[in-house]
Image (cartoon, rainbow, N blue to C red):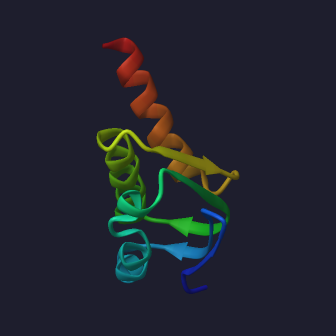
């Protein structure tokens, strides 16, 4: 399934596959998003699969929110690859 992003009141629902082939769509939606909004909620419940490039795109968005002191919330089970990435980052931060 292709990547589909819908938006309603700062809640962005991501559906389909997030991979390096459709990162342009992702970047088009979220480029400079924190210049426009203070709070962004990403619903990844309907993400069917994600590759390394997709995980890194979400991680960059997360880092941008921290840098700009904005709030990014990611909800939904999504796929295990994304959960594992952020879980390993959390363990690294706690261990440091």
- Direction bottom: furthest residue: 2
x, y (%) of residue 11?
Answer: 64, 62
Is 69 above or below relative to 61? above
Q: Residue at x 65, y 57 (%)?
A: 78
In the image, 5 versus 10, the foreground residue is 10
x, y (%) of residue 17?
Answer: 55, 75
Q: Residue at x 48, y 50 (%)?
A: 38
Q: Residue at x 54, y 81 (%)?
A: 3
x, y (%) of residue 15?
Answer: 63, 74
- Residue 52, quarter of the rendered image: bottom left
In this rendering, position of residue 72 left or right of residue 23: right
Q: Residue at x 38, y 54 (%)?
A: 61
- Direction top: furthest residue: 95
The number of numbered badges drawn on the structure is: 0
Pick the quarter of the image with the N terminus.
bottom right
Pick the quarter of the image with the C terminus.
top left
- Residue 63, quarter of the rendered image: top left
In this rendering, position of residue 71 left or right of residue 47: left
x, y (%) of residue 27?
Answer: 36, 73
């Amino acid at each position: 399934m292709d990547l589909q992003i819908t938006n309603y009141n700062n809640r962005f629902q991501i559906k389909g596959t997030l991979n390096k082939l459709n990162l342009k769509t992702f970047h088009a939606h979220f480029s400079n998003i924190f210049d426009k909004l203070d709070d962004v909620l990403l619903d990844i419940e309907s993400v069917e699969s994600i590759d390394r490039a997709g995980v890194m795109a979400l991680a960059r968005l997360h880092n941008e929110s921290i840098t700009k002191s904005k709030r990014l919330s990611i909800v939904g089970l999504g796929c295990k690859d994304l959960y594992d990435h952020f879980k390993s980052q959390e363990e690294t931060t706690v261990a440091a």
